[in-house]
Amino acid sequence: MLASLADGPKHGHAMIDDIEQLCGARLGPGTLYGAIARLEKQKLIEPLPEEDRRHPYRITAAGARLLRAKLTTLNHFARSGLRRLQPYGKGLEAT
Amino acid sequence: MSPRLARVLTHLYPPAWRARYAEEFRKFLEARYVSPSGVLNVVGRAAVEHLLEDWRYALILIPLLLSAEGALYFASGHTPGQAMTQHPMAAAVWLAMEGGALLMLLWAGLIVAPLTWIGTSKPARAAIVFGFAAFVFLQYLPWRLTSPGLAGSLSFIDSLTGGVGVFLLGYFAKGMLIEFQTFDPQDPDDFDVEDVEMLQKHEPKNLEGFSLRFGVLGAKKWGPARLECLRLSSMILGMALCSVQDCRLLSLVGHGLLPAWLIVGSNILIFWDGILRRPETK
């Protein structure tokens, strides 16, 4: 959800569609609002004024910091793993 | 969703949660089509929110469920006929437990069978069919065919075979999910199926290698969400049935895990909902 909000505020409908595009998982309504409640309680997202019967949210500075830290860790892990695989190429044997 | 149903579902949540999100959530539900699995999702999350709000709900609710169903299980006897003659409530509980067993069989047939079919060889498929048939026989038919005197021994055999079988399935599903969690469903070419097949060829007894191939092929066709359904169902049922292996009295725990059956049922809906789902109205 934080990654979904990173590129701009969204309401719940838009978040569900965006998260499905990002990672293939379609959140149920209960799951979505459970996560919204949890993230808002931790001050990682904040609500914006209602627009046309929809309630958008945006990521906070704390949420952005947490997301950056999480993605940096994952990126480091992925790069390290791929670098270690370089000698092996496609044949799974060291060249 | 109809405003009335949206109001009912919103009212399932605890008061503190409703004070903040009720109006917003109700409007959210009214503005879109919510599938049956989505309704189950809302109901399940409402229960979780109650538990999160006050953890003492779990201390009260779970023992109550286990005690009530366990007592009725023993009071109902070992056959539906005995249950029917004793008390209608006992008969209803027995039928509910039978329904749980049927639900598990449906889950096995509707989720496990199609997902395992694509990643297995012919001998493995034959083993799966035979294993499933044996599982059905050992878990379900003896309750119909035997006298109450043998029910105690047969229930132990049922529990042992079912627990071992589902535990293995859970191990398999867990290994599969761990292996393919680096797989990006948005970029299926990220994972080379040839590499995975080579791994399986060189290490045929490696469970993780087999499960990885299954996970890659399954994720490409059905996506990680449905495979997660399989993993969670397998783990929950494995834990539930493993507890029954230990002692006859522990069947109280095994059969008392009604939430496990509900989760399995919801996972069946989630799995097929994505395939049969109607387009959402925006």
Image: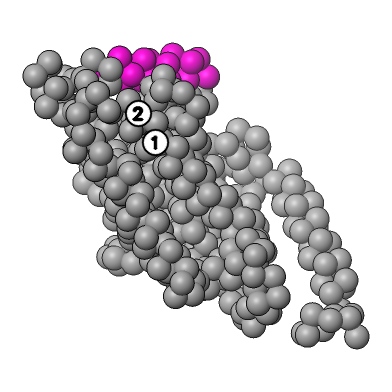
Residue B235 horizontal/vertical position (percent): 51, 44
Residue range highlighted in magenta: B54-72
Q: Is residue B227 visible?
A: yes
List the single residue furthest toward the left. B85
Residue B197 higher or lower than B96, as above or below: below
Q: Which mark is residue B194?
A: none
At label 1, the amino acid type is Ile
Q: How is the image coloured?
A: one colour
In the rendered image, residue B9 lying in the magenta stretch gets the answer no
Query: 10 Å neighbourhood of mark 1: few (<14), some, or many (≥20)?
Result: some
At 30% from the left edge and 14% from the top edge, which residue is drawn? B71
Query: 10 Å neighbourhood of mark 2: few (<14), some, or many (≥20)?
Result: few
Image mark 1: chain: B
Q: Give SS at disc 2.
A: helix
| Quarter of the rendering occupied by the C terminus of chain B | bottom left
Q: Which mark is residue B153?
A: 2
